[in-house]
Image (spheres, rainbow, N blue to C red):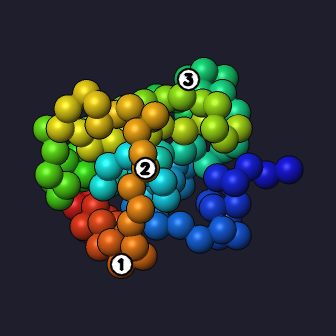
Amino acid sequence: MPSIFTKIINGDIPCYKVAENEKYFAFLDISPLTKGHTLVIPKKETDYIFDLDNETYTGLMEFSKQVAVAIEKVIPCNRVSIAVIGLEVPHAHVHLIPINSMSDCNFANQKLKLTKEEFEEIVKKISSAF
């Protein structure tokens, strides 16, 4: 059975797409820690990030860097943090989280409740900077 992320890639579940190429896909987290919190995934469904072949893993990191640079251009923050947890969805993924302090990257924090319009504004900004 396809993961929720594969369903997003296939267009079966809507998302706020930030960027995409032939192998990778980036979209806004719908339960973000901060504005601009983005998930980056390989299109190839693999549960555990360290089970990715070297080429896919390296490509995921390179694509994540490109997305992070775009986030930094348009979301006010000190830097973009990267986190790989790997338990929430059985599909390798990277969290890119704009932060101003270490506490901004705490997954125990209450998630933001953004409107559809806020998500659309954020995705438009990041996409245009990508």
Q: Percent x, y for residue 12?
A: 70, 70
Q: Which residue in the protein does label 3 denote?
A: 54
Report the amino acid beneath label 2: Lys
Can the viewer see residue 6 in this picture?
Answer: yes
Give the residue at x 86% y 50%: 1
Pick the residue in front: 72 or 19.
72
Residue at mark 3 to residue at mark 1: CA–CA distance: 38 Å
Front position among marks 2 and 1: 2
What residue sits 38% from the left and 46% below the top?
33
Q: Height in image: 115 above or below 80?
A: below
**Which quadrant of the figure has residue 116?**
bottom left
Please give the count of numbered marks on the rendered protein: 3
Name the residue type under label 3. Asn
| Relative vertical location of residue 39 with respect to residue 113 in this rendering, above or below | above
For badge 1, the amino acid type reads Glu
The percent coordinates of residue 52 (x first, y second) are 63, 27
Residue 41 percent location from the top left of the image? 54, 45
Q: Are marks 3 and 1 in contact (CB under 8 Å)?
A: no
Q: Earlier in the sequence, mark 3 or mark 2?
A: 3
Q: CA distance from mark 3 to mark 2?
A: 33 Å
Q: Is residue 23 left or right of residue 20?
A: right
Rendering coords of residue 5 (x, y %): 64, 52
What SS does tag 1 mark? Answer: helix
**Which residue in the protein does label 2 denote?**
111
At numbered mark 2, what does the secondary structure look like: helix, strand or loop?
loop
Q: Would residue 56 appear left or right of 38 to someone viewing this image?
A: right
Residue labelled with disc 1? 117
Mark 1 Cα-neighbour bin, 10 Å: few <14, some 14–19, many ≥20: few
Q: Nearer the viewer, residue 74 or 44?
A: 74
